[in-house]
Image (spheres, rainbow, N blue to C red):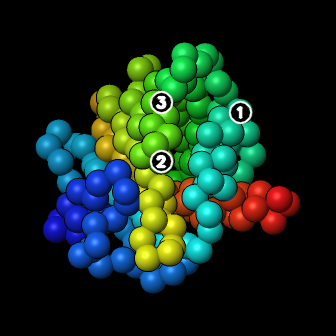
Amino acid sequence: MAQLSALLSAGPQGLAPTQDLCALDTIQQEMERLPQGCRRLAVQLRLGLDPRWLWEALTDYDRLSEFIPNLLSSRLLWRRDNVVALAQEGSQQFIGLRFRARVELELTEHWAERRLSFVMTRGDFRRFEGSWQIGRHEGDTTLLYDLTVQGCVGMPIGLIEQRLREDLAANLRAVQLEAQRRASLA
């Protein structure tokens, strides 16, 4: 858990200088089991890309489902300055069953810190909150996704832990690829 704490304790400028970073273009993951069936996952990617392309991809709310796997829909409901509301629906298949979940999120854009923090206001989980953090370290860019999730009653969180890990890593890769695509068109 010390690695998760180190990943998450970094300030708004990104990772702490003493922190061990993953190698360029690799994903580092940590998971913490919390009380009452909650899980906190931190997934980090280090890449050589201007942070603005990641921000542009992450804040293209109506198009997120076009490049993030298992996200069936993403729709901007409203915007008030740096706070937005999103309706999203995801779908996953595990142990032969298709699982769908809907959430409405209130997301705050912290542009100066390059952080997007979100909390579920309505949805199919008891808890779903976290943040996307874009940082800089020694000329490289880091993308950190931090998620705390608690399934609804009867949702076997233990069974979907591994699936969550795989999906979060795939989501970071998808954001990376979209950001690289946008950078190549500039």
- In space, the residues marked 2 and 3 are separated at their CA atoms by 13 Å
Where is residue 76 shown, x and y percent of the image? Answer: 64, 24
Which three-letter amino acid code belongs to the residue tagged 1? Asp
**Distance between mark 2 and mark 1 Cα atoms:** 20 Å
Residue 166, visible in the rendered structure: no
Q: Residue at x 75, y 46 (%)?
A: 66
The residue that appears at 66% across and 48% down in the rendered structure is: 57
Q: Quadrant of residue 122?
A: top left
Q: Is residue 171 above or below residue 63?
A: below
Query: Along the polypeptide, which appears first: circle 1 or circle 3?
Result: 1
Image quarter hosting the C terminus? bottom right
**Residue 46 vertical placement versus 96 (above, below):** below
Q: Is residue 157 left or right of residue 69?
A: left
Circle 3: residue type: Leu
Question: What residue sits right under mark 3 in the picture?
Answer: 107
Question: Percent x, y for residue 12?
Answer: 35, 51
Which residue does the numbered mark 2 point to in the structure image? Answer: 114
Residue 38: give x, y in percent of width and height. 25, 43
Which residue occupies 46% across, 43% down? Answer: 112
Three-letter amino acid code at the position of disc 2: Arg
2 or 1: mark nearer the eye = 2
- Distance from Cα at disc 1 to Cα at disc 3: 14 Å
The residue singled out by tag 1 in the image is 62
Answer whether labels 2 and 1 touch (C-beta < 8 Å).
no
Horizontal side of 31 relative to 115 (left or right) equals left
Left or right relative to 1: residue 19: right
Which residue sits at x=55%, y=73%? 47
For numbered disc 3, what is the local secondary structure?
strand
